[in-house]
Structure formats: structure tokens, C-alpha cells
Image: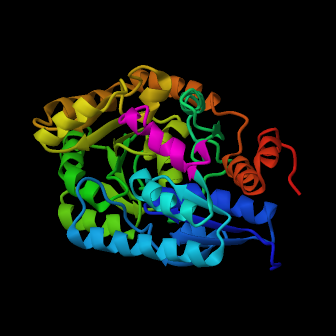
Amino acid sequence: MGASARTYLFTAFEPSGDAHAAPVIASLRARDSSARIVAWGGERMACAGAEMLCRTAEDGTMGVPSIGRLLSMRKTAADIVSFAASNSVTVHIGVDSPAANLPICRRTKRCGASVVQLVAPQLWAWGPWRIGRVRRIADHVICLLPFEEAWFRSRGVAATFVGHPVINAADPEDLGAFAPPTGSADALKVLLLPGSRTLEVERNAELLVECWQAIARAHPNAQAVVCAAGDLVRRRFEGLVGGRLGSRATLVTEAISRAAAWCDFAIAVSGTVSLDLTRARKPLIGVYRTGPIAALAARAVLSAGYRLLPNILAGRELVPEFVPCSGSSAPIVASCLRMAADPSWRQQISRGMDEIVQSFAGHDPGAEAAGLIVGVAMGERALAHAKQGIPIA
């Protein structure tokens, strides 16, 4: 590696961030072959070619983290800043997790790094007053949703829409094995998605069990697959649920694309997984169980009309969403039973999802994001060329 070789630093703190960063790292490696690409992240980033300095994306956290988690994050932040201070980082790419990444990026920027935020913070949904912080810290924001570029640019933040790695993936990669359950050809097929974080599983496992049990009683031939986002989620779900899903339910890990293709519809804890289902044109019911006080606080803070990504992108309630939800589960169970019994409704939702997918057409998120990152590394003129698709030497 030459003395002038660039150093790109990626930091991701959740499984979804690991997945978002991997195709960008792979494209960046191909585009800037002499560069050093280092990361705090997960297995997918390692497989894409990053030099892993610490594994930080095995499980995410939401809400108020524990003292142990806070101390661990403080040490991780200090380690990242120490690396940036002693290794002349060219660009620090903070992947999603703005609450964790932006404070760290502010410090690495003082060490001389340019800053790119990969996955725009959802300020349009809550906390738009934080835009000044993003404007001060980020040299460029990479947007994964079509409307975000104009939203950030109108507020003085350099931003570019590149498509979404879930929807624009030519051939989605599943890390886990998936063998479809055997049964009659006309059996109802239900996918249960308990979330990507163990805390989400703890809050929603009982709700998913209740919904599936109601469907199983009403449809004796129905089958279910529970798709866990990783081994930690799988173990926590098994510990909470035990054998209460019954013999017609199968538990798999990291096989979301094939599981989505298999199912008739899904019951999903709110998150990026709703876009996996949108890409497959499969209806879903979105849930996120929380306490009544937290639910009221969320409704007061969230400014977007909808919480679930397919509804946000459609601009209407395309799919049922109970995000956040507290109190009685009866309306959720009723919606699940209606979805199970009404194939025409499922077809209507699928057509709406197809329209969403078309709005992402023509993008290659990994390649476009890598071009923007190299552009930031090489200056404004190179960034302009990257945005126009002009090769960068």
C-alpha cells in the first residue's frame, strides 16, 4: 500500500448496519483497490473485504441501554477516535445508528477525517430540530429512500439517494439455510419475524405467538416459519417461546429472502425487514409492542403520518401497522385473521408493493454509495463526477 493510499473507516452497531455496509465495502474495494478499509462491524462487512478491528454489530439496542452497554459504547467510541487520531483516516463512514455514530464522527472529524453518514437519519420522522447537528458533522448523507434527498438538501445538507440494498439487490443473499416445511399445496403459509434486536424479541415474542395460535386454530392446515435475524435473536426467541408454536412452525436463521418468497403473508416487528417483504411483494402486518407510557411518548414525538416503511413510501396505509402498540392485542389478532382469510386483500397489497419497488428502479446502492465516498475522499470536483457516474481515477 502506497504512502498516499486512502483509509476508509466504517462503524456499524447493529445487524442491519452490517448488511447495509457490506455491498458498499465490496464496491469500494473494487473501485479503490489500494485503499485500506477498516471497520467496527459484523460478519458481512468482514466477508466484503473490510479489515475488522472489532465486532460491534452482533446485536442492537433500543430504548435506555444498560450501564454495561453504555460503558462498552464509551470504550468503543474511545478506541475508534484513537484509531482515527493515529491512522490518518480519509473518510469515516458512520453506518446508520446516528445516536451512536454522530458523536463519534464529530470527534473523528476533529482528527482530520471527512464524514459520510450511510443511511440518512430519519429526522423527517422525528426530531427534525437535529438537522443542524447533521449539517455540522456530515460532509455527505447517503439516502436509501427516494424522498430523503430533497428533504435533506432543502435544509442545507449535501445528500444523495442511491437506492436501497434490500430492494435493489439483484439476487438477495441469505446467510442461513431454508428448507420449506412440507404440507399440502394449498396450505396457508405465514412468516413470523421477531425483530433484529434481542430487546425487540423480548417485547414482541408473546404477541407473535398469540397471533400465530389464533391463525392456526382458524386454519388447521396453516404452516409457519419464524425467521430470526441471527443466532442471538434465535436463542432469545427459543428461550421465551419454548415449544408453544406447535409442530406446524419451523424456526430458521438469516434466511429472510427465501422465507419471504415462501410465505403468503408475514407478521413482522417493525424495521427494515418490511422492505424485504416489499421487494418480494408479500403482504405484512407490522407490529411493535411497548409499554403505554412509551407508546404515548412515541406518538407525541413521531411526526411522520406512518411508522412502517411500506406505508411511508406509499403515502397511505397500504399494510396494517400497529407501531407502537400497547394494551389489548385483539385488534392485531383480528387483522391477522382477516389477512389469513382474504386473498384478494393480499393481492391488492402486493400490487401496491410493486409500485413501491418500481420507484427504486435503476439504482445500484453499493456502487453508487462507494462512488460518493471516493468522491468525498478526493474533493468536491470528484464528488460531482461520482454523482454523474464519471469514473474516478
Say which of 276 and 265 sits in front.
276
User: For the point 18% across and 29% down, which residue is it?
Assistant: 331
Q: Is residue 321 above or below residue 369?
A: above
Residue 286 at x, y percent in the picture: 33, 37
Q: Is residue 325 magenta?
A: no
Report the side of 9 relative to 41 (left or right).
right
Residue 12 at x, y percent in the picture: 49, 62
Say which of 390 and 175 sits in front.
390
Say which of 134 and 38 sits in front.
134
Report the side of 261 relative to 48 (left or right).
left
Report the side of 242 relative to 277 (left or right).
left
Visible residue check, residue 146: yes
Residue 217 at x, y percent in the picture: 19, 41
Visible residue check, residue 218: no
Q: Which residues are magenta?
A: 117-142
Q: How many marks?
A: 0
Residue 387 placement: quadrant: top right
User: For the point 68% across and 49% down, which residue is it?
Assistant: 369
